[in-house]
Structure formats: C-alpha cells, structure tokens
Amino acid sequence: MAMDFDSQLIESVEVRRNRLTTSLLFGANPTERRWKGRSNLLVYGLVVGALICAFCVAISFVIMVLTNYMQEREERERQQQERMDQNASAVVPGTVDVTDATDATEVTADVDPASVPPTPVHAAAALEAVPALISGRS
C-alpha cells in the first residue's frame, strides 16, 4: 500500500509539472493552447518557405551575374582577337606602318592625316619621314 501512495504522489507531481510548463508556455486555456500550437506551426512553415524562396532567388541571381560576366569576357576576348587578327594581317613583318610610327599628340594641326600614306614602308624610311610629317614638310 505504501508503494501505491508513493507512485501516486510521484505521478501527480509529474502531471502538475507538465501542466505548469504547458500553461507557462501556451497559456491557461486548453483550446487556446491547441490553436496557438497550430498557428505556431503555420508561422514556422511560412518562415521556412520564405527562407527557401530567398535562397533560390539568391542562387538565381548569382548564376545570372556569373553568366553575364562570362559572356562579356568572351565578347571582349573575341573583339581583342579580331583586332589582333586585323593588325597582324595589315602589318608585314620587317616593315613599319607610317601611321603607326607617328604619334597623334606630336602631329601639328597643319598636317593633314590624309596625306600620310597608309602603305607599309621600310623602317628607316619611316623614321626619316616622321620629322618631316611633324614639321609640315613633304
């Protein structure tokens, strides 16, 4: 009989602690407790859903930025390669283009750029022609 009383006392204390804990966390009204528990689950679900959506948008944005960067980089490399191909086909090794030999900042206003021959000439002739082009003499 003493064992039953002790186990009843321990069980009643445990039940009381559980009730106090739930009333502290959820309130005294059991109906309200059930409603709050379900609403908490709903809010947690919405928060998790919003976080998942934000993560997907962030991943999409990063992929878009990287794709645009790679396309721009390929375009710059293609344009640079085209310029290099054009320059390589226009200049014959061992010759100097007179238009490349003159610096635009050194040419005075009285020199007409159309008078500079666009054909490649020998390097020595180009070096002799540069001072004459700058001073305006032919």
Image (tube, rainbow, N blue to C red):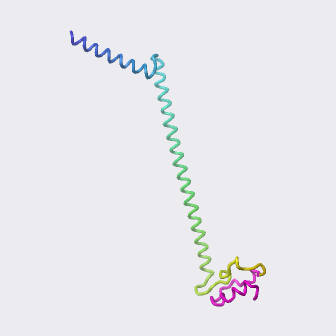
Q: Position of residue 138 (x, y in %)?
A: 75, 89
Is residue 134 inside the magenta stretch?
yes
Q: Nearer the viewer, residue 18 or 48?
A: 18
Q: Residue furthest top?
A: 1
Q: Nearer the viewer, residue 48 or 24?
A: 24
Instruction: Give the position of the N terminus as an image quadrant.
Output: top left
Q: Which residues are magenta?
A: 111-138
* Residue 47 vertical placement versus 117 (above, below): above
Q: Nearer the viewer, residue 100 or 66?
A: 100
Give the left or right position of residue 83, taking residue 44 as reference: right
Q: Position of residue 133 (x, y in %)?
A: 73, 85
Is residue 123 inside the magenta stretch?
yes
| Residue at (32% x, 16% y) in the render | 13
Residue 117 occupies which quadrant of the picture? bottom right
Q: Nearer the viewer, residue 125 or 85?
A: 125
* Residue 54 vertical placement versus 86 (above, below): above
Give the left or right position of residue 85, taking residue 17 as reference: right
* Residue 11 vertical placement versus 102 (above, below): above
| Residue at (59% x, 65% y) in the render | 75
Query: Across the whole image, how many numbered discs are drawn on residues?
Result: 0
Residue 7 occupies which quadrant of the picture? top left
Residue 80 occupies which quadrant of the picture? bottom right
Q: Position of residue 20 (x, y in %)?
A: 39, 18
| Residue at (62% x, 76% y) in the render | 86
| Residue at (56% x, 54% y) in the render | 65
Q: Residue furthest right?
A: 110
Q: Position of residue 69 (x, y in %)?
A: 56, 59
